[in-house]
Image (cartoon, rainbow, N blue to C red):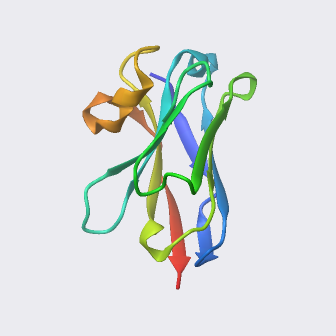
Amino acid sequence: QVQLVESGGGLVQDGGSLRLSCAASDHTFNFYNMGWFRQAPGKEREFVASISWIGGTTYYGDSVKGRFTISRDNPKNTLYLQMNSLKPEDTAVYYCAAPNQPYGDYRRMNDATSIGSWGQGTQVTVSS
């Protein structure tokens, strides 16, 4: 399975922006749909967004739709999450994720049981 390393988290004020990155270990990244999840203290891990392996289609959780944008750069083996209009309720550890199998339906990544690889997570804190 591909190894994943997130970066770009930090502290930002309400209404601010951050961009997260996820670097994959090798070119097999190109064959996998990819996604982002988040987990706040005391809450279950929540689906944020996913993107198809070829990069043309995306899918978002209702709580971030219209504010977050997922994208990927396949030659660089890198996944991104641009987060705008951040709110205190967006505070969480954000995880990059790859499914158990390559290709497939990127929309099914909203189910955490479909995930085969997780990054170590990066903390995002939004102050009010």
Return the x and y of residue 81 as percentages of the image width and height: 60, 48
Q: Residue at x 55, y 20 (%)?
A: 53
Q: What residue is shown at x 35% (from left), y 65% (from top)?
A: 40
The x, y position of residue 83, in whole percent, is 61, 57
Image coords of residue 82 (percent x, y): 64, 52
- Location of the N terminus (image quadrant): top left
Rendered residue at 74%/28% (across/down) = 76
102 up-or-down from 90: above or below? above
Q: Position of residue 65 (x, y in %)?
A: 49, 51
Q: Is residue 23 left or right of residue 64?
A: right
45 lies left or right of 94 = left
Q: Left or right of 112: which side holds 86?
A: right
Q: Can residue 120 be seen in this snapshot? A: no
Q: Is residue 71 above or below residue 123?
A: above
Q: Which of the pair 119/65 is nearer the observer?
A: 65
In the rendered image, the vertical position of residue 23 relative to residue 61, given as above or below: above
